[in-house]
Structures are given as C-alpha cells and as structure tokens.
Image (cartoon, helix red, strand yellow):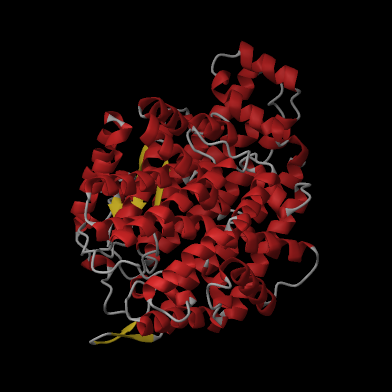
Amino acid sequence: MDMTTPTRDQVPEHLKWDLTLIFENEAAFDACFVETETLIAGFAAFNGRLNRSGKILLQALEYDDKASKNFDRLFFFAQLAVKGDAGNLVAEKRLARVEGLSTKLQSAAAFMMPQLTRIKPARLESFINRTPGLTVYRTHLQKILLTQPHVRSHEVEEILAKASKLAGAPKDTFSVFESLVLPRYMPMVRVVDHDPVKLNNQVYARHLNSSDREVRRQSWEGMMRSFGDFGPLLAENYANRVEAAIFQANARNFATTLEHGMSGPHLPVSVYDSLVGTVRANLPLLQRYLKLRQKLLGLEDLHMYDLYVPLVSGVESNVNFEDAKQEVLAAVQVLGEDYVSRVRRVFASRRIDVMPNQGKASGAFSWGIWGFAPYMLLNWAHRFNDTSTLAHELGHNMHSEYAQDQAYVDAGYSIFCAEVASTVNEQLLVHHLLSVTTDPRMRLFLLNQQLEAIRLTIVRQTLFAEFEREAHRLAEAGEALTLDRLCELHKTLNDDYYGPAVVIDDLVKYEWSRIPHFMNPFYVFTYATGLSAAICISNRIIKEGQPAVDDYLRFLKDGNSKLPLDSLRGGGADLSTPQPVQQAFDHFAATLDAFEAEIARL
C-alpha cells in the first residue's frame, strides 16, 4: 500500500466534494432509481406513434427528457463517488446498478431515433410550427435528420444499444487497471537526499520536473516499463476497443471509424486531417524550440525524459490552493462581472475535490449535468501547473453553467467545443501573470509555460491523434493490432515529430498504452483544435475587449443549439479552415522570439 498518499477519510472534509448536493442520502438515490425504472417501462406507449401528430411527438420528447434527466443524475452521483474512491465497494456496486440501467434505457428508447428519421422534413416542420413547445427541439430534430443515413431499424438500434456496454468494457478495464492494479507493481525510485519512494502519477509528474536528470530518467523509465510489463494485456484491451469501434461504424454504414467519430460533432473528416497536416508542416518550429531547450539545459543530447523539466529554475514556489484561486479570479476579470461572480460561487461551494488520495482517479476533470452545478476533480501537488489546471477545469465549469441557459435538450456542448473554454482560461491566466510581473526570470518561466502548453496540447495531442487514426486504419485493413505493431507505430511517430532534436528512447514505444483517452476513439484531437481556437479567441479578447468578450460569452451560452463549427465561428475561430491552427503556431513563434529576447537581456 502507498503510505505517502492519504486514504479518503484522511483528507479534510472541506477539500472533498459534497455529493449530498446531488442526492441527500441513499434513500433519495434509490427512489430516483425506481422512478427511472418506471419511466423506462413507459416508453413503449410511444412506440410507432411519433409521426402521428406534433402533440404526440412533443409528449414523447418531453418524456425522454424526463427519463434522461433522472438517469443523468443517477450516473453523475454514482460515477463521482467511484472517481473519488475506487476502492469503495458500496460505490462500485451502485455504479454497476446504474450502468445496467443505462442499457435498459437505451434499449427502451431505441425506437425513437429510427422513427424520428422517418418523419419527412416537411411534415416535421409542420409539427414544429403548429405545436407550442416543439420549437425548443428544432435544432435537436434537425441534427437527427442529418444522421438519417446512419440510423438503422428499431430492431438493429435495440441491439446496438445493448451492445454499447460491451464497447465501453475496455475503458472500464483500463480504469480498474490504472487505479487499482498498476499501483501495486510500480517501482521504487530514488529522490535526492531522501529514501526511495513508490512511483505513482503524482510522483511521476513531480519527478519529470526535477533538475536531477537521474531522477527524471528513473521515473520516466519506471513508468514506461510498468506499462510495458502489462503490454500484451493493454494491447489486447486496446485492440478490442478498436474492434468495437469498427463494429459500430460498420453497423451504422460509415466508411471508416474516423468518419463515424466525426459524425457526433457533425464535422467533416477534413478537419481532423487538416490538423495533422498543419502540425506536421510546423514541426521545424518545434525543432528550433527543442534545440534551444537542449542548449539551456546544458545537455549533450536531449532525451524524452528531458522534455518536461522547466527551463527556468528557482521561480516556482509551493503554490497554495487559496492563493491560486485569487490568481485565477484576477485573470478572468476581463470576462466581466457575471463571469467573475459565477467563479466566486464555484470557489465558495464544496464541489471541488482538491487533494489526491488512495483510489482516487488521476488527473483532473470538470463535469456538469443539467439542473446541477458542475463538480471538479483535482489532484493538487502545489505546483504552478496546478494553478493552470484549476483555471482549465474552471473553464469547463463555466461552459457547463452558461450552456444551462438552453433547454435540457441543448444544454450540453459538443466534444469538439469541449476544450475551448478551458484553454481560454489558461491563456488569460498566463497573460495576466505576464502583465503583473517585471521579474525577468518569472517572465521567462511564464513564456516557457506558453511554449510548453502548445507543445503538449497541440503537438503532442496531434501525435496521439495521428497514432489513433493510423491504428484504426491498420485494423480496418485487417492487420492485427499486436503489441509489437502498436509500439512500432508509436515510436515511428515520435521519431517523426521529435527527431532529430531528441533521442527517441526505446521505452517511448510503450507510451501509447498509458493514454486513457484512447478508450474514447478520436477524442484527443479536440485538445489540439481546442487550444488553437482558444489562442485565437483569447488574443482577440485581449486586443479588442468587449466585442470579443460578447462573442465569446454567446459561444458559451450556445450549448448545443448550433452546430459546433458554426458556434465556434461565431465565437471567433473558424476551424473549418487551417487558419486557427496556423495562428497557434504563429503565436508559438512570437512567444519563442520573446523568450529568446528575455534570455538575451539576462
């Protein structure tokens, strides 16, 4: 057992989220569960009747909303409890119950999509115009019509709904492996002037920032070997996830899994391919930065474990959570009083789970559902990056809050837009900090953070996106996704992106196996497009002020009421063209120039 990380009950209450704000007690959860089961049984009353009248269609859609709201609440509560403490058997059993309910709900409502797509557009428009209440569903119904070629019969849709849990099984397997199995096999690594410590995600992140190269090397190699030791298992698990994606794409008449993946946010495949092409065209700029990194670190060669250590030492202090909140508040002042007041409410609530504990999910996230304020998970390690993560997740919070201005059916937002609000906040944070400090070393540190944000979020995530695209293509062509093949693919891509400036250590071939987002096919590219859009939007906010702020807040409020490309275009970033990604690299070049100029002044 890891004795350095506290157990859940050792973390102070005010630093843990309060899930009673969702359900007061287990009895309330059970009552909602039973009510949802009853609602599921009632779907049959609408089967075969959706095209009869606008009144019946409205009743069916409102009924579906009610059942979905209930389920959202149940899943939200159950999943958060497990994310906070994966070793809690009561929470695990509760989540399993809810996941079973999900299959029943999808199966019961499976008739709706096929029957909705069979309503002729003119008749549907007539329903909307003549039925008060249906106008709320106009965009939702129009999006459904766009999916018409890929919706199957009621019987096939019911089978696909039942099969959806199988498609999610590899993700569940990876989650259990990472949180409960892998920690038992992590190696001990040394720390300068201290006894060896057991490697985990928090130790790993801290050690990659160490000025001691041996500490960096041991931790990086220890992490890669730990995943490599389970390589055959992880390769099989990933191959199963890809096969599930192929089955789903084929079942819905898509030519490829990528085309299927892009259909959710209604994007052409060209957006994905354009990202990869634009990033590859700008790799010489990355090489310039990496060579500068090698020079400043005073190294004869640069290895993969040298890519994260700050280029400016002795600047970052022990960052307090309360101080970080104040910095973030100052950074978002430019977005106006309404935005700032919402941030203050988040900080005053018990909806942020701050500290790491045994069994807690790694990383960070924000998650909201309609009718409830979002919750945020952090793993605070007292570093500058934690302040940046706080700003990032707060952006997700605000997006979820503003999108609730829409009715339930449009209150979410596309996965394609999901990383924009978060990274706008990060950009505003760095801009604020650069504006208030004259310390040349602090300015270098902040500029380096900007360079690293683009390297990690645009370049690295695009590398992952290319890995994913190629892995799926191989499987679709009938090639087995063996451990050796996946490792070969990942190492080759690292050589393309980072060589010749970096020694491509052999163990990097296992890195793909520790990326949890690969369990959600074609998700990682949204980090790269999201930051590209955020750089465009935040730079415009800084230069133009209120008009740009107004456009941005309208984007946040759009939710799902518009197609994502249209919504982002209105917010200030047209990702139907390569321009935002290229603007991000132009920003990278300008930041690199400023960084070099600051060095020259020292």
- Quadrant the N terminus occupies: bottom left
**Residue at image location 42% in from the left, 60% down from the top:** 452
Residue 28, picture quadrant: top left
How many marks can you see?
0
Instruction: Say above or below: 339 vs 392.
Output: above
Residue 598, picture quadrant: bottom left
Instruction: Say above or below: 144 vs 86.
Output: above
| Residue 173 screen position, x and y as percent | 54, 68
**Residue at image location 41% in from the left, 39% down from the top:** 538
Instruction: Say above or below: 40 vs 63.
Output: below
503 vs 493, nearest the viewer? 503
| Residue 229 screen position, x and y as percent | 54, 84
- Side of 258 where 309 appears, left or right: left
| Residue 513 screen position, x and y as percent | 56, 72
Residue 231, picture quadrant: bottom right
504 vs 234, nearest the viewer? 504
